[in-house]
Image (cartoon, rainbow, N blue to C red):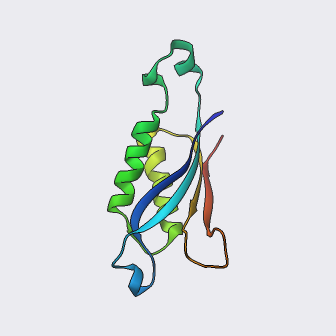
Amino acid sequence: MDTVFIEGLEVETLIGAYDWERGIRQCLHLDLHLGWDIHPAAEGDDLNQALDYARVGQAIERFAEAARFELVETFAERLAETLMQEFGIPWLRLRITKPGVNPRARRLGVEIERGSR
């Protein structure tokens, strides 16, 4: 299984469990590794056989825009489900960092892996 990756993607969404967070949009940083067989696309130089980065990015933006979760864990789980279903991705690893949560930590967040390679 090959891997298509998108790293350092920033999205804004409504996320948080505290009252002060429920009225503001916050930035999340996403790193994705998506299982995909790139051979058919590479063989024919055919975008229709590739996992289209632009379409994946647009789907993530739409998801983040509509999301209203308290937990980063829920955001991660639902985004993984959405991407796997919409694009037929058999496996993915998703890391989400929520900056500014703790001033003593460089990064805090979750990383999940779903599907099978």
The residue nearer to you, when weighing 78 against 61, is 61
The residue nearer to you, when weighing 84 against 2, is 2
Q: Is residue 81 above or below residue 36?
A: below
Where does the image place residue 10, in percent across and percent down from the top left? 48, 56
Q: Is residue 90 left or right of residue 11?
A: right
- Residue extending farthest to the bottom is 19
Q: Is residue 103 left or right of residue 50?
A: right
Where does the image place residue 6, in percent across and percent down from the top left? 55, 44
Q: Is residue 65 above or below residue 73?
A: above
Q: Quadrant of the C terminus?
A: top right
Where does the image place residue 41, in percent across and percent down from the top left? 52, 21
- Residue sitting at 40 percent across and 85 percent down? 20
Q: Is residue 39 above or below residue 23?
A: above
**Corner quadrant of residue 2:** top right
Q: Quadrant of the N terminus?
A: top right
Q: How many numbered tags mark residues here?
A: 0
Where does the image place residue 57, in percent across and percent down from the top left? 43, 44
- Residue sitting at 49 percent across and 32 percent down? 51
